[in-house]
Image (tube, rainbow, N blue to C red):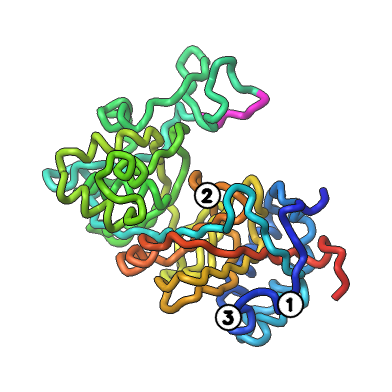
Amino acid sequence: MALSPLLQPVSFDALPGWHLDAMAGAFDAFRRSAGHHAIKPYRTGALGIRSSGFGDAFDAALAVPRLDEAAARLFFETWFDPYAIRPDDRPTGFVTGFYEPEADASPVRTDRFRFPILARPDDLVDVEDDARPEGLDPYLAFARRRPDGRIVEYPDRRAIEQGALAGRGLEIAWLEDPVDVFFIHVQGAARLRMPEGLRRITYAAKSGQRFTGPGHVLAAMGEIPRERVTMQSIRAWFRENPGRVDEILWQNRSFIFFRDAPVADASLGPVAAAKVPLTPRRSIAVDRLLHTFGTPVFVHAPHLAAFGSAPFAHLMIAQDTGSAIVGAARGDLFAGSGDAAGEIAGVVKHDADFFALVPRALSGRTP
């Protein structure tokens, strides 16, 4: 597989801020992906950055436990060549942010805790294209297997929240705010503060329907100006309009199911799509159909100051994905866990330039 024409070779000197970034954290994140690759290689994305080409770089990363900042930069410059990623669907690249929410929760329903987080139902099945029933929406990657064996569309958010799965013992935990539940769905993971201690959950599956964000809905209705749509403004609108929460959220038909996902190191985020714990400010979610997990991606966002100062110019590692992350030059920056990280992630909506680091085993360029 050849590299995509969306990848254009450049030099490290062409990466704005490359020499100012402290990269030890990026190396640690990359090394975690190397450990997973040794067990099960990642699938190659359509940009053509073949998973097999990472072998030498992954082996080199696993050979050392840690690197200082200078050695980490030299590591990436030794094993990779930079390529600018040409946007395929807009004039520039674009970044948003995500985080791991924290919320109080109960193991049982109470008068205070009434809104459940659900585990994956046993009748929810993955739908493969070569076995897709005639007439089933081609978008659906999940569906329901009926007792008679037929595969049909799964109940959507409204149906589930109105009781379609009630009585099946799927409740992992109960929360007090349906908006908190929804944003845990959006983020795909959470730390739940339970009476018995902290419980971490992560994405297990979804009902399959298309995602429709409440920000898009509220902007289309004229409730929030489109340029002011953030997680914070959406939450504020729901606080001011508690009687309209279902009206807005049910327009997003997609529903997310969860599983337990303990992470030994509390400084790290949840285990995500690349099967490693996310590293705050170093892990990025990408379009998994295009990108290969484990790929280092340098992001330069001139006007992004939410992480401390502008410009944002940091080396990230592709370690997660999301249904809203579509396109070659599109990414979601992991801000960390808890409310402070949520304040950062919620306001990230910025143009950005993306540069993929391609293993020299694949680039064909001379050092």
Helix, strand or loop at disc 3?
loop
- The location of residue 297, given as percent across then percent down, is 63, 65
Amino acid type for the residue under numbered disc 2: Ile
In the image as oriented, which residue stretches furthest toward the left?
111
Q: 106 or 140, which is in the foreground?
A: 140
Contact? badges 1 and 2 (CB < 8 Å)? no
Per the model, the C-alpha gap separating discs 3 and 1 is 13 Å
Amino acid type for the residue under numbered disc 1: Glu
Per the model, the C-alpha gap separating discs 2 and 3 is 25 Å
Q: 341 or 237, which is in the foreground?
A: 237
Amino acid type for the residue under numbered disc 3: Asp
Is the residue 271 above or below the residue 19 in the image?
above
Per the model, the C-alpha gap separating discs 1 and 2 is 28 Å
Q: 144 or 170, which is in the foreground?
A: 144
Q: 303 or 47, which is in the foreground?
A: 303
- The location of residue 364, given as percent across then percent down, is 87, 64
- Residue drawn at 86 percent across, 68 percent down: 365
Magenta stretch: includes residue 303: no
- The location of residue 302, given as percent across then percent down, is 51, 71
Query: Mark 2 or mark 1, which is nearer the start of the sequence?
Result: 1
- Residue drawn at 42 percent across, 46 percent down: 259
Which disc is residue 77 wearing? 1
Q: Which residues are magenta?
A: 125-130
Query: Mark 1 or mark 3, which is nearer the start of the sequence?
Result: 3
Pointer 3 residue? 21
Contact? badges 2 and 3 (CB < 8 Å)? no
- Residue drawn at 56 percent across, 55 percent down: 330
Pointer 2 residue? 325
Mark 1 crowdedness (10 Å alpha carbons): few <14, some 14-19, many ≥20? some
Mark 3 crowdedness (10 Å alpha carbons): few <14, some 14-19, many ≥20? some
